Image: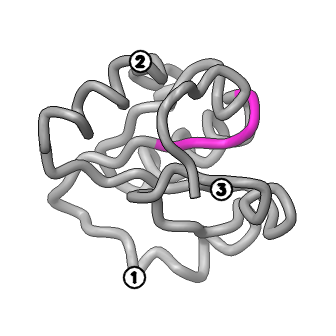
């Protein structure tokens, strides 16, 4: 079983967005955390909902997983990776995000 997940820094994610790259960001935080601000392009799927919402996640695209600190998103990413998805974890999470939020 793969217990390793590729990582990406918040600064790199911000650069991809600034460069206009088509990227998929999935924010796995709780509703109240997201209400305080999320990356505008991110899709919000709470960690607990991921198993039943797999159908909403593109199989042929790489996804960047985001949470507050990078722990929950790593767990979500490992789960998705086991299901055959391509994922990266944004290390440091929203605590280190300096880009735009809405």
Q: Residue sitting at 61 percent across and 53 percent down?
A: 38
Residue at the disc numbered 2: 11
Residue 59 point in image, percent of width and height: 24, 63
Q: Earlier in the sequence, mark 1 or mark 3?
A: 3
Residue 25 point in image, percent of width and height: 41, 51
Residue 21 point in image, percent of width and height: 13, 43
Q: Is disc 3 placed on a helix, strand or loop?
A: loop
Q: Earlier in the sequence, mark 2 or mark 1?
A: 2
Q: Rate crowding at label 2 as few (under 14), some (14 to 19) or many (20 or more) other CA atoms within 10 Å.
A: some
48 in the magenta segment: no
Q: Is disc 2 placed on a helix, strand or loop?
A: helix
Q: Are marks 3 and 2 in contact (CB under 8 Å)?
A: no
Q: Say whether residue 1 is left or right of residue 49.
A: left
Residue at the disc numbered 1: 55
Q: Nearer the viewer, residue 52 or 62?
A: 62
- Residue 40 - label: none
Q: Nearer the viewer, mark 2 or mark 1?
A: 2
Q: Nearer the viewer, residue 7 or 31?
A: 31
Residue 5 point in image, percent of width and height: 46, 25
Q: Say whether residue 29 is left or right of residue 43.
A: right
Query: How far apart in space, not on screen, are marks 2 and 1 (Cα)?
Result: 29 Å
- Residue 28 - label: 3
Q: Say whether residue 16 is left or right of residue 83.
A: left
Q: Nearer the viewer, residue 29 or 80?
A: 29
Q: Say whether residue 30 is left or right of residue 85.
A: right
Q: Rate crowding at label 1 as few (under 14), some (14 to 19) or many (20 or more) other CA atoms within 10 Å.
A: few
């Amino acid at each position: 079983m793969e217990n390793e997940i590729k990582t990406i820094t918040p600064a790199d994610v911000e650069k991809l967005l600034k460069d206009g790259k088509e990227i998929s960001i999935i924010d796995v935080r709780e509703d109240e955390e997201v209400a305080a601000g999320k990356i505008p392009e991110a899709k919000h799927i709470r960690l607990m909902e991921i198993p039943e919402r797999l159908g909403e996640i593109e199989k042929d695209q790489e996804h960047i997983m985001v949470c507050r600190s990078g722990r929950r998103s790593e767990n979500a990413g490992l789960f998705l990776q086991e299901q055959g998805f391509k994922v990266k974890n944004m290390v440091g999470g929203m605590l280190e995000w300096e880009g735009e939020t809405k």
